[in-house]
Amino acid sequence: MKLYHLSSGPLKVNTYFLVNEKTGGAIVIDGGENYNLVRKTEEKYGFKIKAVLLTHAHFDHAGNAKKLQDDGAKIYVSVKDAPKLTNDDNLAADFGRKFDYCRADRTFSDGDELDIEGIKIKAIATPGHTDGSVTFLTGDMIFTGDTLFRESVGRTDFKTGDREELVRSVKKLFALPGDYRVFPGHDEFTTLSYERAHNGFIDYD
Ligand SMILES: [Zn+2]
């Protein structure tokens, strides 16, 4: 499996591509808003996007999901964030952005193991930024969306956000055994061991 990454837009949203090199099929984690950039990345590296996985359904992460779905990709989102793909809880209206409403092809809940294109990914419920936010775990990598950032955590002042839940969620990630490379929804990559030691937003012991 190979990982590619794209940062896009003023919010520096991270889009990740997990590619099965044997089949050429790829999973996108958080497509972002920019459809053309995702397509260019696909062409550049020669893979084919089969699925779009959303850490949560905010517009800046899910904005191009409908267009990718129209091209044949399946949309995967948590049960709790699925309704945000068809209502204003995706925050697009609040930020003056357009949003192409779409329906999930598949929803999942805490602990579900997804097997897409021969790539196994576990969904871990990490609510707090939204009530349906998840972290995806595969191999030695976790994709934390807007739950955990390098030396920071996600905002909880949006609709369906909850500070106490977010703290619990980050502690749940910190309690994972061993170390993981951490790929957040915005900004720089980090590791779980670094965040356990340096993330000032969560008291961890
Ligand atoms: Zn968000």
Image (cartoon, rainbow, N blue to C red):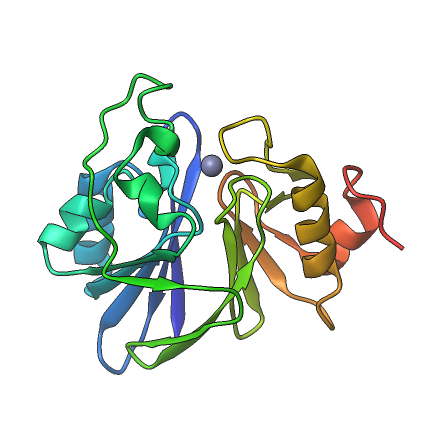
Q: Locate residue 91 relative to residue 87 in the image: left or right.
A: right
Q: Please, which residue is most extreme toward the left here?
A: 71
Quarter location, residue 192: bottom right
Q: Tell me if residue 15 can be seen.
A: yes
Query: Percent x, y for residue 116?
Result: 31, 75
Question: In this orientation, does residue 8 appear?
Answer: no
Q: Is residue 45 above or below residue 103?
A: below
**Which part of the image, by quadrant, shows the C terminus?**
bottom right
Q: Nearer the viewer, residue 48 or 129?
A: 129
- The picture places residue 191, in percent across and down from the top left corner, at 67, 57
Task: Name above or below for residue 173 compared with residue 121.
Answer: above
Q: Residue at x 27, y 38 (%)?
A: 63
Q: Quick check: 167 left or right of 158?
A: right
Question: Residue 85, image x and y in percent?
Answer: 29, 42
Frontmost residue, 116 versus 93: 93
Q: Is residue 144 above or below residue 88?
A: below
In this rendered view, identify the residue nearer to me: 205 or 151. Answer: 205
- Residue, x 49% and y 44% (percent of image)? 185
Q: Give residue 34's position: percent from left, percent from top.
A: 25, 37
Q: Quadrant of residue 121?
A: bottom left
Q: Residue at x 22, y 74 (%)?
A: 24
Q: Quadrant of the N terminus?
A: bottom left
How many labels, in total? Answer: 0
Which residue sits furthest right?
A: 205
Q: Is residue 105 left or right of residue 88?
A: left
- Residue at image position (80%, 38%) is 200
